[in-house]
Image (tube, grey):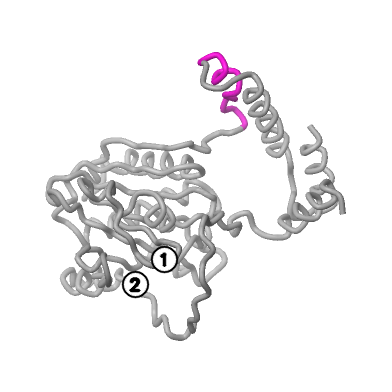
Amino acid sequence: MNLQARLLFLLAYCSATSWALIPHINPFKLQEVEYHGDDVGEPLILTPLLEQGRIKDARIAASVSLSGCAEDITSYAGYFTVNKQYKSNLYFWFFPSTSDYKKDPVVLWLQGGPGSPSMYGLLMENGPFTVNKHLQLELRKHSWTNNHSVIYIDSPVGTGFSFTKNDRGYARNQTQVGSELYEALQQFFQLFPEIRKNDFFVTGESYGGKYVPALAYTIHKNNPDAQEKINLKGIAIGNGYIDPKHQRGYAEYLYQLGLVDKKASNAIKDLEDKGKCFLSLTNIHTRLFLFRLQHYLCLSI
């Protein structure tokens, strides 16, 4: 089978799956770990406790106990119900700042994808620890939690550990994503009222370039009339997938800055052209033959 035939086969296979389910490439060859799905217990949904005013009980329930090098790290995890009708719940893992918790900024981290869990950012990018090739925790020297309190949320519903009991509970647009994250944050600050007035930043990367503005706008829109305001101070987006169709290419720009040579610039331009072609594809899940054909044309650029 030649290279083009292999590519067509691979692309056709990928088209039968959801883009949100395509995993990140892991640099480690992970060991197989035996587990039984029935052993994980019930999801810890904190919303009922918050509604009953049982804040202390909720925090005790959400407290996470880790072993090994991370046993001294304080953290809290659980679920916030963001849509009662469809029983939709967002999963969070919160790490208080190890410096000045009551004064340090609070940062929300949102992964991209769409469909990539924020736990990836926690474990592989900026959290207090990472997982090595032996599936053991290792402390990260330069963690955001050294001087920020960081909350990681698997968003939207259906991403990572976040789940819904009804297919209608999945987000249909960015407005819904922003609204459900806003609801989760209101419950989060109810759980940790001592840091509600701290500076708050929404951050993310890649496809999070859509989630971050969606949430920030929702906060900005709701704050004037909100009984409990969120002290939004700014947003931060890395390699943002915001509006790729209209985001300019960087091949020539990088070349003119002297950061790449002409050969590298041409290679980047080639990838940019392929990307623009892929963006023009439509109905990729319902018209498989056309999908394969258009992918072949894009790859032939």
Magenta-drawn stretch contains 251:
yes
* Kind of residue at badge 2: Ile
* Badge count: 2
What's the CA distance linking mark 1 and mark 2? Answer: 8 Å
Q: Amino acid at mark 1?
A: Asn
The quarter of the image holding the C terminus is top right
Q: Is residue 11 above or below residue 75?
A: above
Q: Secondary structure at mark 2?
A: loop
Compared across the picture, whether 115 is left or right of 60 comes to right
Question: Any magenta on residue 102?
Answer: no
Q: Residue tagged by mark 2?
A: 45
Q: Of the numbered discs in the image, which one, if any, rests on residue 217? A: none
Quadrant of residue 78 in the image?
bottom left
Going by the image, does 100 lie left or right of 21?
left
Q: Is 33 situated left or right of 192 in this image? A: right
Look at the picture and state if 67 lies above or below 118.
below
Residue 24 lies, in percent from the top left, at 55, 54
> Which residues make up the magenta segment?
245-257
Marks 1 and 2 close (CB-CB < 8 Å): yes
**Which residue corresponds to mark 1?**
89
Percent across and percent down for residue 80 are 35, 65
Can you tell which quarter of the image residue 90 is in?
Answer: bottom left
